């Protein structure tokens, strides 16, 4: 969910019965101004630049709360790797294991073709490989 100012966040929190503490509002504002994928460590680094030191427990507790009230989506790649997504609209993700990043894939009618094209374009940028020589199985999670 994208917010353009702190007042919107405060109103959203109050509407969901969540106390709009300064820390919580600043954390939400820092991660919801644009669609983005990030890990808890990224949030810790970003928030601790602006505020006094915020504990990892506070970061994780608030991220869980934000998922619960619909501000974020949580995407678990594997037990050791979880991303959070401020884009709460329906969409798919492509995980690039070489860059350790997620990319949004919009939902379209011809989804299989869209996903295959996106993945092959990324592969071609990394390796000299012809599209026709690459077998590709796509597994969607979520």
Image (cartoon, grey):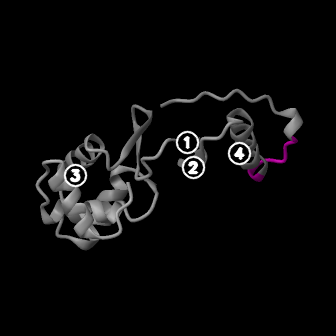
Circle 2 SS class: strand
Q: Which residues are magenta?
A: 125-130
The residue carrying pointer 1 sits among few (fewer than 14), some (14 to 19) or many (20 or more) residues within 10 Å by Cα, namely some
| Mark closest to the chain's N terminus, 4 or 1 | 1
| Mark closest to the chain's N terminus, 3 or 2 | 3
Q: Quadrant of residue 43?
A: bottom left
For image coordinates 18% across by 48% down, the residue present is: 16
Q: Are marks 2 and 4 in contact (CB under 8 Å)?
A: yes
For the stretch drawn in magenta, what is the main secondary structure? loop
Q: CA distance from mark 1 to mark 2?
A: 5 Å
For image coordinates 17% across by 63% down, the residue present is: 23
Q: Are marks 1 and 2 in contact (CB under 8 Å)?
A: yes
* Circle 3 or circle 4, nearest the eye: 4
Quickly name the residue at label 3: 56
Residue 80 appears at what percent x and percent y?
40, 36
Residue 63 appears at what percent x and percent y?
27, 48
Q: CA distance from mark 3 to mark 2?
A: 26 Å
* Circle 3 or circle 1, nearest the eye: 1
* Circle 3 or circle 2, nearest the eye: 2
For residue 118, the mark is 4
Position of 1 relative to 113 (above/below): below
Quickly name the residue at label 2: 103
| Mark closest to the chain's N terminus, 3 or 1 | 3
Quickly name the residue at label 1: 93
Residue 40 appears at what percent x and percent y?
33, 50
Q: Are marks 4 and 1 in contact (CB under 8 Å)?
A: no
Circle 4 SS class: helix
Asked whether, in this view, residue 48 is left or right of residue 130, the answer is left
Q: CA distance from mark 4 to mark 1?
A: 11 Å
Front one among 87 and 39: 87
């Amino acid at each position: 969910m994208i917010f353009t100012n702190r007042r919107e966040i405060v109103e959203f929190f109050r509407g969901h019965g969540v106390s709009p503490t300064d820390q919580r509002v600043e954390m939400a504002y820092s991660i919801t101004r644009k669609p983005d994928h990030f890990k808890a460590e990224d949030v810790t680094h970003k928030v601790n630049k602006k505020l006094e030191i915020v504990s990892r427990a506070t970061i994780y507790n608030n991220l869980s709360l934000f998922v619960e009230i619909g501000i974020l989506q949580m995407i678990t790649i594997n037990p050791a790797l979880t991303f959070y997504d401020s884009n709460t609209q329906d969409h798919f993700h492509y995980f690039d294991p070489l860059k350790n990043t997620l990319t949004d894939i919009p939902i379209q009618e011809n989804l299989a073709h869209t996903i295959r094209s996106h993945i092959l374009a990324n592969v071609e940028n990394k390796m000299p490989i012809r599209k026709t020589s690459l077998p590709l199985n796509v597994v969607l999670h979520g």
